[in-house]
Image: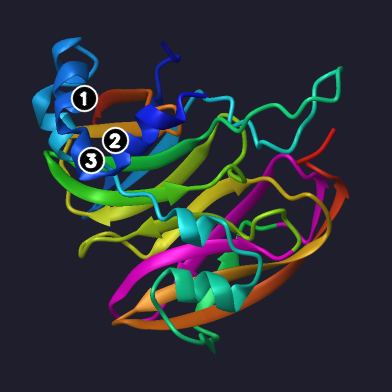
């Protein structure tokens, strides 16, 4: 893996490199400007508190307004576990999915601009039976709900 | 180049439901090959969905999202024929952009 290139891209110093990439036709200039941010620290965490901290928040409050839908109690295949999460909290900005017993806890973070319903349905991998957390950021505060999902066949190793 | 992203967008009343199916290996970085060597992680890190150029959903993913990722969500607004664009970027810097019209 070409880590040097990646590092250069991550730092602002990669402008000339980006220009090269653009010249090679891989990116149009417009796309290159919208350089995507990826919170590496948050995706490296192993606990709920550490993840919230890496996302820039403090201890989340348990909330009944954060709910799971179309989410099984028992997943036969840990490689494909459907998870739906909805937030009824006003000014919900983002929803994150965390799996306690995965090698890294954070699976995904979704940001909801105004006008988008704070509700998401996706599929995740689970290494084993685990508590799954739905972490909601609303009006700068963090709220959490959890659900245990039993996994018959793990979806990470092999 | 990766296979196209499949996008379905349907408007009902004032709400548009978007369903997206991306073609990606989403290698976890946990698996090993026959020689016992770890297979390097390869996964989509960023997803952006726009409606007529306005972002309606942005996501950051780790390798724990399933292979050939699926997602669905709803936003207010949208009319038949409006353009929905889905872009993803993976940890190798590869990207793919696909679009569909709201039905």
| Disc 2 target residue | A9
C-beta proximity under 8 Å, tags 2 and 1: yes
Q: Position of residue B92 (x, y in %)?
A: 44, 27
Residue A93 on the magenta segment = yes
Instruction: Write down the region rendered in magenta.
Output: A72-100
Are callouts 1 and 3 both on one chain? yes
Q: Residue at x 41, y 80 (%)?
A: A57
Q: Quadrant of the C terminus of chain A?
A: top right
Q: Residue at x 41, y 78 (%)?
A: A88
Q: Earlier in the sequence, mark 1 or mark 3?
A: 1
Query: Dot 3 lies on which element?
Result: loop
Distance, label 2 to label 1, CA atoms, is 7 Å
Distance, label 1 to label 3, CA atoms, is 13 Å
Q: Position of residue A115 (x, y in %)?
A: 21, 62
Query: Dot 2 lies on which element?
Result: helix
| Disc 3 target residue | A35
**Residue A117 position (above or below residue B78):** below
Q: Earlier in the sequence, mark 2 or mark 1?
A: 2
Q: Residues within 10 Å of mark 3 (few under 14, many from 20)?
A: few
- The residue nearer to you, when weighing B24 against A55, is A55
**Tag nearer the camera, 1 or 3:** 1
Q: Position of residue B53 (x, y in %)?
A: 12, 40
Query: Dot 1 lies on which element?
Result: helix
| The furthest residue to the right | A152
Q: Is residue B53 left or right of residue A143?
A: left
C-beta proximity under 8 Å, tags 3 and 2: yes
Q: Is residue A100 left or right of residue A39?
A: right
Q: Position of residue B6 (x, y in %)?
A: 41, 24
| Disc 1 target residue | A17
**Residue A82 position (above or below residue A2):** below
Colour pattern: rainbow
For residue B32, what is the image quadrant? Answer: top right
């Amino acid at each position: 893996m070409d880590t040097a290139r990646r590092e250069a891209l991550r730092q602002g110093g990669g402008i000339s490199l980006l220009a090269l990439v653009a010249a090679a036709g891989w990116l149009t200039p417009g796309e290159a400007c919208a350089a995507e941010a990826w919170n590496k620290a948050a995706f490296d965490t192993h606990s709920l508190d550490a993840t919230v901290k890496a996302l820039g928040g403090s201890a989340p409050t348990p909330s009944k307004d954060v709910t799971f839908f179309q989410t099984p109690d028992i997943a036969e295949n840990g490689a494909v576990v459907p998870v739906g999460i909805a937030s009824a909290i006003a000014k919900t900005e983002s929803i994150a999915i965390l799996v306690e017993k995965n090698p890294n806890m954070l699976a995904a973070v979704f940001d909801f601009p105004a006008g988008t319903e704070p509700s998401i349905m996706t599929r995740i991998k689970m290494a084993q039976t685990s508590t799954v957390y739905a972490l909601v950021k609303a009006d700068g505060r963090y709220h959490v709900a959890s659900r245990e999902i039993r996994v018959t066949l793990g979806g990470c190793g092999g | 180049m990766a296979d196209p992203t499949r996008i379905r967008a349907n408007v009902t009343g004032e709400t548009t439901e978007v369903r997206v199916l991306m073609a990606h290996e989403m290698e976890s970085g946990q698996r090993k090959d026959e020689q016992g060597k770890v297979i390097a992680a390869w996964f989509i890190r960023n997803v952006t969905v726009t409606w007529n150029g306005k972002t309606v959903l942005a996501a950051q993913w780790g390798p724990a999202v399933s292979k050939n990722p699926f997602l669905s969500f709803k936003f207010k607004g949208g009319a038949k024929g409006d353009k929905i664009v889905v872009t993803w970027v993976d940890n190798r810097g590869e990207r793919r952009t696909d679009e569909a019209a709201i039905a």
